Amino acid sequence: MITITLLVENTARDAGMLGEHGLAWWIDTGTHHVLFDTGQGMALLKNAMRLGINLESTDAIVLSHGHSDHTGGLEEVLTVAKHATLYLHPRATEPKYTGSDHKPHGRRISVDFVEKNAFRLSAARVEVTRVPVEVVSGVWTTGEIPRINDFEDTGGRFFLNAAMTRPDPLLDDQSIFIPTAKGLVVVFGCAHAGSINTLGHIGNLTNHAPIRALFGGLHLENATPRRMDATMKALREYHPEKMGFCHCTGFQAMRKLWDEFPGKCVQTQVSSQFEFPD
């Protein structure tokens, strides 16, 4: 039995749960535990305790990319998950900023603990890699994702410096996929590489195994109509059985996804849990 629980997300509905702009997933394979992202740091440990999830049992921690809403809780969780191996892309430690033309300087969205490699002093083991890795039996990272199609971009204005003169291609973006007997379960962080680029890459890695379920953020908040339409068309071709999108997907995109895929989209917020028997 594979169980996926959402520990951190923008919204929380159950009593005692905390919401924050961020993302963290708990993946329980029955024999191993993987934490995918860590939120901003205010909610992860509290929500895990409330849900009865023992973060001390974490075998692997995977960072989807270096933004603070996915890495901010890393320092705190490493004080608990003392035996976990940390997996990240080498460019996840770069300085990261976002901003607009209306402001002279970008807003920093990286954290010192990651940017200064302080995690190396706390983690039991660190794997910095660009390639796909099986972090525990049956749970894989995508590694760096090729940017193939002509309609997807990083989903926003992201930079490597405060002056906003060096665009960040976010090559550190990666997702997780889990092969099951009925197809792949894919979990996105923010899909800055593009959800369709990501699914194409996973297809190449798995001999184009069918897609069973999709979860996570798609970063379609700023998507053009062309990108939105092309994304919906491509997703239809994958025939996913279940989709739980959240976080940075965007309200307009969420509405369109629920309209385009009736009966397949599910509400996804803190404490949401999804089980896959085989």
Image (tube, rainbow, N blue to C red):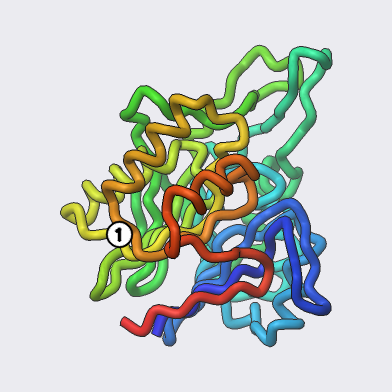
Residue depicted at x 62% and y 55%: 120
Q: Position of residue 125 (x, y in %)?
A: 53, 64
Quadrant showing the N terminus: bottom left
Residue depicted at x 50% and y 75%: 274
Q: Quick one: which residue is furthest to the left in this view?
A: 207
Which quarter of the picture shows residue 221?
A: top right
Residue 163 vs 146, above or below: the answer is: above
| Count of numbered labels shown in the rendering | 1
Residue depicted at x 21% and y 59%: 209
Q: Position of residue 139 (x, y in %)?
A: 38, 67
Viewer can see residue 134? no
Q: Secondary structure at mark 1?
A: strand
Viewer can see residue 53? yes
Give left or right: position of 169 versus 177: right
Residue 152 vs 23, above or below: the answer is: above
Residue in the foreground of this view, choosing between 56 and 26: 26
Give left or right: position of 46 versus 90: right
Residue on which disc 1 sits: 211
Q: Position of residue 4 (x, y in %)?
A: 51, 73
- Check disc 1: other Cα within 10 Å, few if <14, some if 14-19, many if 20+: many
Residue in the foreground of this view, choosing between 124 and 59: 59
Which quarter of the picture shows residue 226?
A: top left
Give left or right: position of 39 versus 37: right
Q: Position of residue 224 (x, y in %)?
A: 52, 25
Residue 30 vs 266, above or below: the answer is: below
